[in-house]
Image: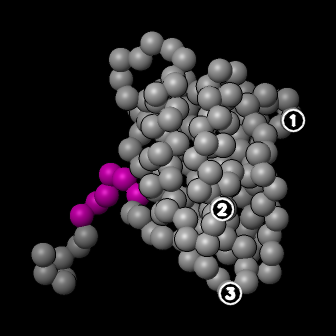
Amino acid sequence: MKETDEFPERSYPAARPAKRLRNQSTIIFVTACSKDRRKIFADRRVHDLLVRSWREADAWLVGRYVILPDHVHLFAAPNSFDPPAIKQWARYWKSLVTKGWPFERTEPIWQRGIWDRQLRSRDSYVSKWKYVRNNPIRHDLAEQADAWPYQGQLNALPWKE
């Protein structure tokens, strides 16, 4: 490929390592989708399985999260000074979910990869949480954000500057 050639279009997100920004928090906004966006996640058993998997995959701490029928949003922060890449961590907890899947399955559960974005400011963190929290309302799944049963917080991830 010559320098002037365009880059090929990606069918999955590019991997970027999390950057430590001085003494600032490292919080990553993560989205993981079901294969072909099948509506398979909005179930109490899946919710409990995801929570158990995130607790076992403790290289990254999960803060707030919302589980929708075809995708999951969460905020994660490293649990050690040198955690594995966020993509490796996601592969691990997704494999735990797949192994413990409570329903019969004939297809892969997960879409390849994840979408992740490192948050750069307290304002970005607050606005992303508002977006995630209101997702069930936007998708006509609940009339109020608090009414959606498949959400929670495993760890407090305060923003430090």
Q: Nearer the viewer, residue 114 or 4?
A: 114
Give percent across and percent down for residue 46: 62, 25
Q: Secondary structure at mark 1?
A: helix
Q: Is the Cβ of the residue at disc 3 closer than 8 Å to that at disc 1?
A: no
Residue drawn 73% across and 83% down? 23
Q: Which residue is most to the bottom?
A: 22
Residue drawn 41% across and 64% down? 15
**What residue did someone put label 2 on?**
79
**Left or right of residue 102, residue 1 in this image:** left
Q: CA distance from mark 3 to mark 2?
A: 17 Å
- Disc on res. 146: 1
Of circles 3 and 2, the one toward us is: 2
Question: Neighbour class for label 1 at 10 Å: few (<14), some, many (≥20)?
Answer: some
**What residue did someone put label 3 on?**
22
Q: CA distance from mark 2 to mark 1?
A: 28 Å
Mark sitting earlier along the chain (3/2)? 3
**Left or right of residue 146, residue 30 in this image:** left
**Left or right of residue 10, residue 94 in this image:** right
**Occupied quadrant, residue 117:** bottom right
Residue 87 falls within the magenta-colored stretch: no
Magenta segment, prevailing SS (helix, strand or loop):
loop
Q: Amino acid at mark 3?
A: Arg
